[in-house]
Image (cartoon, rainbow, N blue to C red):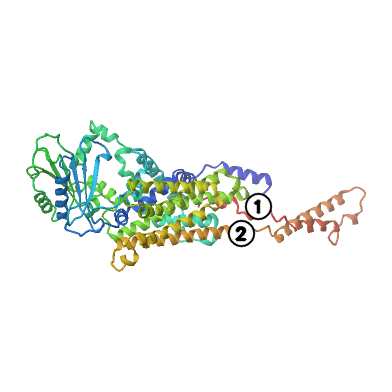
Amino acid sequence: MTTVDHVKGNAAAEAQPEGIRQSMSWLHTWAGLLLGWVLYAMFMTGTLAFFRDEITAYMKPEVQVQAVTSDQAMITGVRYLQTHAPDALRWFVMPYSDRDPVIEVSYQKPGKTGRGSFQRVQLDPATGEAVQSRETRGGDFFYRFHYELEMGYPWGRWLASIAGMFMLVAIISGIITHKKIFKDFFTFRPGKGGQRSWMDGHNALSVLGLPFHLMITFSGLMLFMIMVMPAGIYAMYETPNQFTADAYPSFASKPRTNVPAPMAPIENMITQANTAWGGASVGRVTVNHPGDSAMTVSLTRLVSERVSYGRLPPSMIFNGVTGEVTSASENDSAIMTTVGTIVGLHLGKFAKPWLRWLYFIVSLAGTAMVASGLVLWVAKRRQKAGKDAANRFSLRLVDSLNSGTIAGLLIAMPVFFLANRLLPVDLPDHANWEVKLFLWSWGAAFVYGFVRQRQAWRDLNALAGLLFLSVPIVNALTTSRHLGQSLPAQDWVMAGFDLTMIASGIFCVWLSWKVNRHKAKAPAAVKPKAAPRAAPQAASAASGEASAMAKSAAVAPGTSTAAKAPPTSPAPAVAPPVKTATAAPPERRDDALPPASAYQPR
């Protein structure tokens, strides 16, 4: 084939339109990158939220209460509110559980609206007295950060919804792009280094929890369906409040009459609900207009009993004055069961300890999947750029954002736990100071990632490891519920938390060591072009020059027939080019790089 034919063939190949896999590869890359840092934070905090109650219990070590039956806990909570909040607009009582050892009651203060209008109190189930403990948001901080990103309503939820849409697009396009995705799950080559190792790890983490990743992303979007797609509600209802009253009957209430009236015994209402539900427990008590003749009492079934109770569990509504049942809803239609199951799978409240740990592990794999995708974006383009990688602004920017987001969050989490132990217990605004230190430490990691880019990954991971390892030490110095006490007493909340901190610290230190080792080996990995590879090319060039000289001599005028014959031995003039060509410059290594086609996604 001539050179002209070869060029025409390449032009024809380039003129062909992109296939579906190539198009999806572009979409997968950019959908995963543009909001990848937000998705990483959402995945990590959402993973911790599966142990929301356990984290809260760990951050209140002084709370040690004696358990009672669920019905007795409900009665205790209502009696406390009757005494301490008789003029409140609404009461809520959440019973204790094996995960949360206290009764949580809250009430809405009159004359106020919004989240700040509610007062929360935790009670000892045995005595009914308020539990005195340090102020902290505990696991609720990670739970709300997961979908609100510590932003004002509704902006955080909108950003989380948009990021969830990007995540769903990235997952689907990734499945289409990787034709051998399941085969690649069994292919992991950590010794290869560079983009190949990151690609193998990204594929393995993606396939490991693929059904979970699809479920958790789609169900998360379903949670905000009313906010993102409200057109159906506005088409059927005049105001959103009418929809809320139909969808959540326990929150619906009639206007106050301002006529005082005593409340019927809550014990009788709980007994009726237990009988109607076949002995099932009550999960929440809601009292609207307490102390008024328009008072209603709503009893809701325990959410953890079934997966489909995630959104709207069965409920019974009583007249608060007479104690008679006014309405009952099983919420067992096909639509409600489907929606409840999707939401229940996302929240995971039905999960028992072993299943909850499975949720945690697979969700952690999803977090690592997002992180590896962000790092892969840099590794792939850095390997393509070669020597010019250090001068690429885009690579330096994304790499700094990666280290600040990924390693920075690993620093902020133990800082949050250490602040809980090291700040004075009676410090005003104790809970907000914990959050401030979390955000400040994360921000400092971002700054360090931009200032010390070459050392950022190593240093930030090492610092995160030391902070994680210090959490159990500080816990032992500040409380009596350390590993030496919690393990013999089988206090698995405290012991499990400390052991998880130790495992996390070891992992981060190992990660820092791996990064440092890779940096140390990087210069040795770049080898100069080998001399033997250049020799054949030089010999070929010398042979071509000798042939040209022979032809020129053959056609020169006045030459004899003997002069046209080729020489029997190599011409002396050919030798110098051969010798000089064998010594290639050491710094040139263009042909040591793989061809550009090697970077195309498979």
Above-or-below relation of 382 to 291: below
Marks 2 and 1 sit apart, C-alpha to C-alpha, by: 14 Å
Seen in the image, is 425 located left or right of residue 250? right
Q: Nearer the viewer, mark 2 or mark 1?
A: 2
For the residue pair 326 and 478, the one nearer the viewer reads as 478
Seen in the image, is 592 located left or right of residue 441? right
Question: Few, some or many C-alpha atoms within 10 Å of disc 1 (few <14, some 14-19, many ≥20)?
Answer: few
The disc placed on residue 225 is none
Is residue 204 something that shows in the picture? no
Mark toward the start of the polypeptide (2 vs 1): 2
At 72% from the left edge and 57% from the top edge, which residue is drawn? 534
Q: Amino acid at mark 1?
A: Asp
**What x and y, as percent, mark residue 355?**
30, 59
Seen in the image, is 574 located left or right of residue 268? right
Q: What residue is pinned by disc 2? A: 525
For the residue pair 287 and 248, the one nearer the viewer reads as 287
At 22% from the left edge and 38% from the top edge, which residue is drawn? 244
Above-or-below relation of 336 to 564: above
**What x and y, as percent, mark residue 553?**
87, 51
Question: Few, some or many C-alpha atoms within 10 Å of disc 2 (few <14, some 14-19, many ≥20)?
Answer: few
Q: What residue is pinned by disc 1? A: 590
- Residue at the far left in the pictured view: 322
Q: Amino acid at mark 2?
A: Ala
At 40% from the left edge and 57% from the top edge, which residue is drawn? 208
At 37% from the left edge and 49% from the top edge, which residue is drawn? 434
Task: Look at the numbered disc 1 and give the secondary structure of its residue.
Answer: helix
Is residue 95 something that shows in the picture? yes
